[in-house]
Amino acid sequence: MALAIASTIRRLLARIPLKARTNSLAARLILAAAVWSSLALAVGGLVISNAFRSAVADNFDASLATDLDGMIAAAEPDPEGGVALQNRFLNTRFSRVYSGLYWQIVPEEKGGEIEISRSLFDRTLKLADAVTSGKLTWGYADGPENQRLRVLARKIKFSDETTPPPNDYRQYTFMVAGDLSVVDNEIAAFNGTLIRSFLALLAGLIVAVLLQVRVGLQPLRKVGEALARIRSGASRRLEGEFPAEIAPLAAELNSLIEHSAEVVGRARTHVSNLAHYLKTPLSVLTSEADTSPGALAEAVKKQVEVMRRQVDHYLARARAAGALDVLGNRTQVRPVLEDLKRVLEVIHEARGIEVAVDCPAALLFRGERQDLEEMAGNLMDNACKWARARVVASAAKHGGWFTLAIEDDGRGLPPEDRARAMARGERLDESVPGSGLGLAIVRDIAKLYGGELDLAESGLGGLKAVLKLPAIG
């Protein structure tokens, strides 16, 4: 039985992946419960099986003792010096050949004739491994069909008036034997039922443990799902009710998230303040250079412009990098594009630039609004500067990402100049206002979010900028 249970456990464990068996709390709990349950059932099964075996053996011996008592009660000495048995006191199985129940009477005096039951037919019993307990002797013998027999024997004396004193009695050994295969078959049937019952019980216990572990670990799974929602931007904190054991963990995680957002916010404020403080002296230098024309003034103005562009560039990068460390950031894309559309149409009203926006209302960017405004604003502003009359901003979701395409109907950009346009600090045309750093900033911020920026030819005839960014949902 223990081997059968162990085999069942092995089959169950084989269905669990190796990594899950070694690195899963649920698998460890289930495995421990399965091992201890199987051991307990195996030990209990052995105890029950042995108890049943003893009970069946004792019952079998008691049945033999009853048959022996009936045989002795039916025995009477006959006038010829033998023993006569009255059939009405005997078990009917003694009359059937090889029935599995036999008797034999052996006289003590030499030369006496051994009497046997009809069930023995023409065989006799030889007692072996005899053990005497009081007046009874227990042992074993080989049956007429070479089966193993349990034998019970007792010596009986009958008075005999034909025998002169002091030996006025005759002594016989009465023997009753039963086929032990009956006991073995009964024990085997019981063990089979016991094994099937215990295997069913073990399976039920394992199922119960599975349900218990699933229900017991559900709060931990809820914490994992809540963290995934926070990481994806669908939520900003752990929400819901947790058991008393998990509630402190949820509270600490929420505190950590809030502290992280606070720290990042302070750092971004410091960076913005630093940029502001740098821009003021740079503006003063530019003004002073304008009042004193000359080669030195031009050199100062050129270097101030470089410094200003670098400040803008690294300020944008610092802001985007800080936003990445804040869990739960999410931004609706369409309102940002609509706001930029209104601002740019006012700025370029004199040129009659029309800006069209095509974006699903439910589209969410997994990041901060300022970063999306920075990227989309640079691209849409560039498109408006080079467009003749029309700019189109369209967004579409693809799995966990979305693409934002900005197209214009301007003169476009040759393929060999597109890489240079995105290079840091590279300006291809000084006639158009700007620092020339917009595309480089957009590219760097997109990379921080794991996205990318590509330039291609637009169907409107001008340039098409395609921005790939992480989405939510």
Image (spheres, helix red, strand yellow):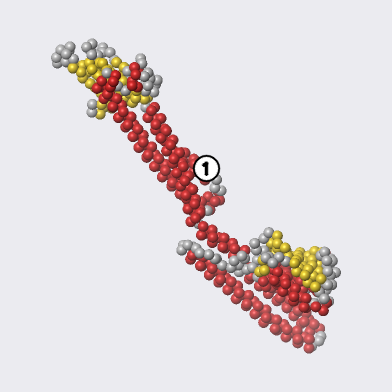
Q: Which residue lies at the image location 62% right of the left edge and 78% below the top edge?
A: 270
The answer to whether residue 122 is visible is yes
**x, y percentage for residue 467?**
73, 65
Whether residue 445 is visible to the viewer of this picture, yes or no, is: no
Q: In the shown orientation, is residue 26 left or right of residue 328?
A: left
Residue 193, relative to residue 407: is it above or below?
A: above
| Crowdedness near tag 1: few (<14), some (14–19) or many (≥20) residues, C-alpha within 10 Å | few
Q: Is residue 417 left or right of residue 252?
A: right
- Label 1: which residue? 11
The quadrant in which the C terminus is found is bottom right
**Count the marks: how many?**
1
Disc 1 marks a residue whose amino acid type is Arg
The image shows residue 238, relative to residue 268, as above or below, that is above
Q: Position of residue 443 (x, y in %)?
A: 73, 67
Front-most of residues 394 and 329: 394
User: Furthest residue to the left?
Assistant: 165
Figure quadrant of residue 173: top left
- In the orientation shown, which residue stands out farthest toward the bottom? 291
In front: 222, or 252? 222
Choose between 436 and 43: the one closer to the eye.
Answer: 43
Q: Could you tell me which quadrant the N terminus lies in? A: top left
In which quadrant of the rendered view does residue 167 lie?
A: top left
Position above or below: 199 against 261 = above
- x%, y% of residue 192? 44, 35
Q: Name the spot of residue 51 as percent of width and height, x first.
A: 35, 37
